[in-house]
Image: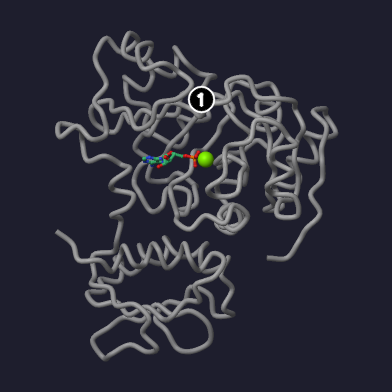
């Protein structure tokens, strides 16, 4: 991966404006939240979101949390169920992430949701995160700002140690307060705990007046975490196909004829940006048999191949 200059930005108006400009141009900016430092990109921009995965070296596409400045802004993207409203009123801004049904017209990259019909949202409680969000004025997708497999960063120096030369900027806002990640509750169906974190489960249950289901609970609604790993087009998928048979629809990569092409120029970031949109398009085309061209297994190719292998795996 090409090295870029990572700007260290101050937690001041000039820093927030620069961070907003970088985000608007499709770049990556790390900023502190009350949990850990996040690695932010414009959640509407497929290529910018693909760059998050490239910078972190993530070997798989897990859906990302979208950060917004206020509950009103969140309601533009997801259906605020009555239970979600209660939790938002009680805990936002704060270290609680809600997974909710995404609105049909929500302008969010399919790479953010990993192709799912749900979206994880949070209003962070940190003055610097709040300022970056309001200067930018849009949704920011942000996982923790660490290389994949390393521990989450709680200072700008940690972020720099892990991602210097791989991201465009870091807003240095000092050390994070909570230091653990946000609690994640799905309100798609009965409220379900997907990850323990900064907001205690007891407080959430007291607010709702009911116990949370656990992800592994057989009574839990189809857990989005599991759906994430199972998302696949309806058609049968054959991988590493240099060309398609007559009955197959070809999803290509690089030069050559194809019904759909992840990246005619063979660019892995472009391919990642197109992946989920094209899998959905294959469904829309009614493709029953899908052949996918070979994709090199380096950089983002690893995450692309991971997702395609899941799509090609035998189904129940
Ligand atoms: P991180 O990338 O460390 O911020 O973690 C994000 C967490 O949120 C992961 O555990 C994801 O699986 C989870 N998550 C994000 N979006 C969704 C979603 N739509 N459904 C279920 N889980 C989600
Ligand atoms: Mg993380």
Q: Where is residue 139 in the image (x, y as percent from the top left)?
A: 57, 39
Does mark 1's beta carbon lie closer than 8 Å to ligand 1?
no
**Which residue is situated farthest in the right direction here?**
14
Colouring mode (rainbow / by chain / secondary structure / one colour): one colour
In-front residue for pair 224/21: 224
Q: Tell me the quarter of the image containing the C terminus.
A: bottom left
**Dot 1: within a 10 Å radius of its alpha carbon, few (fewer than 14), some, or many (20 or more) residues?**
few
Q: Where is residue 270 in the image (x, y as percent from the top left)?
A: 56, 67
Quadrant of the image occupied by residue 214: top left
> How many numbered marks does the figure carry?
1
In the displayed structure, does residue 172 sit left or right of residue 88? right
Vertical comparison of 84 with 136: above or below: above
Vertical comparison of 155 with 307: above or below: above
Q: State the residue position of label 1.
A: 72
- Ligand 1 quadrant assignment: top left
Q: Position of residue 296 (x, y in %)?
A: 50, 76
Q: Tell me the quarter of the image containing the N terminus.
A: bottom right
Vertical comparison of 314 with 68: above or below: below
In-front residue for pair 159/71: 159
Quadrant of the image occupied by residue 39: top right
In the displayed structure, does residue 41 sit left or right of residue 13? left
Numbered disc 1: secondary structure: helix
Point 51% across, 29% down: residue: 181
Point 29% across, 61% down: residue: 232
In the displayed structure, does residue 71 sit left or right of residue 156? left
In-front residue for pair 137/56: 56
Q: Where is residue 314 in the image (x, y as percent from the top left)?
A: 20, 66
**Which residue is situated farthest in the front direction here?**
150
Point 73% across, 40% down: residue: 20
Quadrant of the image occupied by residue 196: top left
């Amino acid at each position: 991966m090409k090295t870029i200059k990572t700007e260290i930005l101050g937690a001041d108006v000039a820093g927030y404006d620069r961070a907003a400009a970088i985000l608007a141009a499709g770049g990556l900016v790390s900023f502190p939240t009350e949990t850990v430092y996040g690695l932010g990109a414009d959640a509407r921009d497929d290529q910018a979101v693909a760059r998050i995965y490239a910078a972190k070296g993530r070997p798989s596409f897990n859906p990302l949390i979208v950060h917004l400045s206020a509950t009103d802004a969140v309601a533009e993207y997801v259906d605020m169920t009555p239970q979600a409203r209660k939790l938002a009123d009680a805990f936002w801004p704060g270290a609680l992430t809600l997974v909710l049904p995404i609105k049909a017209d929500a302008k969010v990259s399919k790479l953010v949701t990993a192709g799912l019909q749900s979206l994880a949202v949070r209003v962070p409680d940190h003055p610097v995160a709040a300022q970056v969000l309001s200067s930018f004025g849009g949704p920011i997708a942000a996982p923790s700002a660490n290389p994949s497999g390393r521990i989450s960063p709680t200072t700008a120096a940690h972020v720099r140690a892990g991602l210097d030369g791989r991201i465009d900027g870091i807003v240095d806002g000092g050390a994070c307060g909570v230091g653990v990640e946000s609690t994640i509750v799905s309100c798609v169906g009965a409220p379900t705990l997907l990850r323990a974190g900064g907001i205690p489960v007891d407080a959430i249950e007291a607010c709702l007046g009911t116990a949370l289901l656990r992800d592994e609970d057989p009574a839990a609604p189809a857990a989005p975490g599991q759906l994430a790993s199972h998302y696949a087009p309806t058609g049968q998928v054959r991988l590493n196909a240099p060309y398609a048979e007559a009955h197959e629809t070809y999803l290509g990569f690089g030069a050559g004829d194809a019904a759909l092409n992840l990246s005619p120029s063979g660019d892995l970031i472009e391919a990642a940006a197109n992946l989920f949109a094209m899998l959905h398009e294959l469904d829309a085309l009614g493709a029953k048999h899908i052949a996918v061209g070979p994709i090199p297994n380096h950089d983002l190719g690893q995450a692309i191949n991971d997702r395609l292998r899941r799509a090609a795996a035998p189904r129940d």
